[in-house]
Amino acid sequence: MAKAFPDDAGTEDSATGASGAQSPAIDPDSLAWQLLVAAELCLVTANQQRREALCHLDRLLDQARHNQQLSCDEVALWQRVAQGEQLPAMALWGGQAQLPWRLRAGMAPLTTTPGELPEQRSSIRQQLARQWEIDDRHSLIETLLWLSAQGDRYSWDIDARELEQLTAEDRLTWRTRRLIEEQAKGIAADPTETRRTALLVDWVESHQPLEWAAWDWLRLAELACQGTRCGWLSEEEGRLFTVHAVQLMQQRYDSWEALVAAYQRGRCLLLGPPDEAEQERWQLLLTARVSPWQMPLAELIDERDRHAARTFMLQLRGQAWQFAMALAAIRDPGLVARCGARGERSPERSDEARRYLEEMLEWRQGDDDLCLTRCWQPALVHCLNQCAADAVRGVMPLCTTPFGSAEPQEIEERNALAACASHSATIHMAEKYAFHLIMAWDAKALDSARFVALTEALRATLCCFYVSAQQLLDAWLSWETALSSTTQASLAAELEWHLNDPGSVLKWVSWQGRGAFSEPGERPSLKQFTALALIGPLNAAQWTLPVKAGKRAAATLIEWLDSHYGIAQPEALVAFLDFLADSGDRQEYQINYAPYTLNPVRLESEIAILESAARSENEQVHLERLRRVMANTEGCNDYDLAAWDIAQLVDLASAGVSVGWLTPDQLSHYLKLAEGLASRHYSGWQEYAHGLLAGVSFFMAGDSEQQGVVAEMKQALVAWLSGAPPLSGSWSCLTFPGQSDDRWPSMHIDTLGGDRYTLH
């Protein structure tokens, strides 16, 4: 999208004179500006310079007559000016309604309100197509919105911020890496990019101002003018886009001089420094008595203009899908260009989105959109909110557990959540969901009605928890900083940019949700979440209720059920779940192994017999378990092993829903059974962890695998119990089933249903 108007941006390609010959045309407003400056020179300069100015003025008037750009009355008016008659500046530059167009004077000053020019419509549209790849009204509006919200300044700002944080040696490495990246594209390094990189580094090292947003916003005003003249924008639309550009400028610059300096820096980065003639033109704008910039920048628009322009801009991005697109654009800045009139998806984009969903969500073409439900994780939000509230009050779990201690860095990460206590973590979940939602739309996994419904639900949810874009961005940056990971690039720099830039797309989307509050995914109750947490480190942390998986993912799960449990159909799964709830492997220990703890002599004899002869596979398993009883491996003789059955019960019930063998009601039934078993057998998470480790060690691993499995399990149990690092597990933020809920309440409304401390 990095485009630039040439120095004569206000001119058209050509015009036909009265004789029919082709001659260069001058934009009427650009001509008026030149005439005015020439006339001013006639009035204030010495005789020789005045004669030269008069000659120049005569040539301009002759050209205007020849090309029929000025009427006879207008030519006569300028002749009177040349003879010494002064014109009131306000009469020349228009009244109050025309004031915003003075911003465009950097390209070519407007002396009249820009309206459609039918005779020049074709040449203007050709110019827009050639210079901007704009070929219709929709692409024009998208480009205008892109200039407003992101433009060229975004990447330059991000690069400059990164360079400021590097040492001189690291900056050299940064420049080299950029050159290699260019060469890796398979083409010769772009000299413009190479020059821009060198210039950025030089400016950073010499502590030059790193401000260039005016480069985008002045071009926004110019493009609005051209769009009006070629008939793609109404005069009112063109004016409102220009008022918006003024709004943005006024938030960043306190004078025309600051605006010009920023524009010139942007021009240098993209096109190189201006030539002498252009510099003189800018100087005239800043100093000439008749310059449209004699009026202060701060006075170009009034409150009525600001309100009208804001309403107009919010209407342009009023759809809920544009809200979701704006959220996703933080991770994929290219989406900003699609937040406008259409948001179209190219075939290449669709293919890329399909590959992404296949890799990240195991979605395949032909699957439904339930994969998105797994991305909506209210339980994760509840956990983060609770941990932040606990951290700020200093009531986090101990970092030393019976299984080991958390690493100092992990403890710091956990304690850093205290800084987030005043912000709901909803955005941490919602922004990732928004990104996956846009990927699903691009991959054509959703129809239009479903997409609109989900985006409206997403917007309504965030509007419930955050009253403005500023509050949302503050919360997002807070959680992003606290949860930053070395395995995933942080978005902190991008979020800070959006906080600081007045044109940020998130500040110009419609913030008000429509209709009743409705989430885009299912919200488990606190009891359901606690029951799901009983799986513990036996599987990945469960942050949402399971849903039916896609065909290929379900087939993989069915294969796993068959190979590990011999379960190949729904009836067998239900029977095994009932077995786990009623007796499970814990009964086998009580019947076949617990008696040996009372008779060590018999235990030694049994082991010796098995070791002295050839053994079947089952006998080998029995021998290994007898050895564990003798060694009391991981306390298998001391701890209740029911946790092993409970964790399997929840894990397999969840898998049953994923493959479509169990209904949500059946899942709820087994979750209640698991919760009841846990409350009867254990008094808390630490005791449950002992039972789970002992069960895993006793039943799951063979001798050759046991050491690695147990070591990994202990490390995971430390994280689940201590909450360090964050998001490793959920036990630290949950009260164990059946225990009194005496923990401090969360400070946020965004907690799970059933939490009696939920704030409303």
Image (cartoon, grey):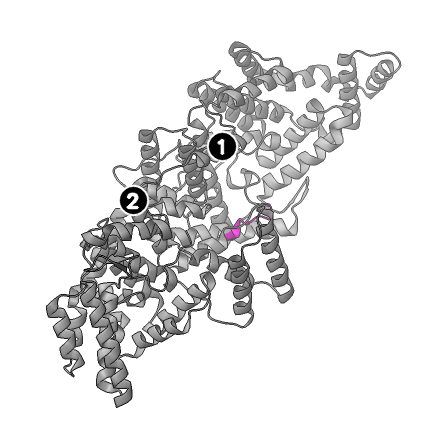
Residue pointed to by mark 1 = 357
Residue 591 in view (yes/no): yes
Q: Can you see residue 255?
A: no
| Residue situated in front as seen by the camera: 318 or 660 | 318
User: How far is the residue under mark 1 from the one under mark 2?
Assistant: 29 Å
Q: Secondary structure at mark 2?
A: helix
Q: Does the segment drawn in magenta span residue 482?
A: yes
N-terminal label among 1 and 2? 2
Query: What's the residue type where badge 1 is placed?
Result: Leu
Nearer to us in this view, 168 or 290: 290
The residue labelled by disc 2 is 138
Give the extent of the magenta segment.
Answer: 481-487
Amino acid identity at mark 2:
His
| 730 sits to left or right of 229 | right
| Local secondary structure at mark 1 | helix
Judge from the rendering whether residue 197 lies leftward or rightward of residue 451; answer left or right.
Answer: right
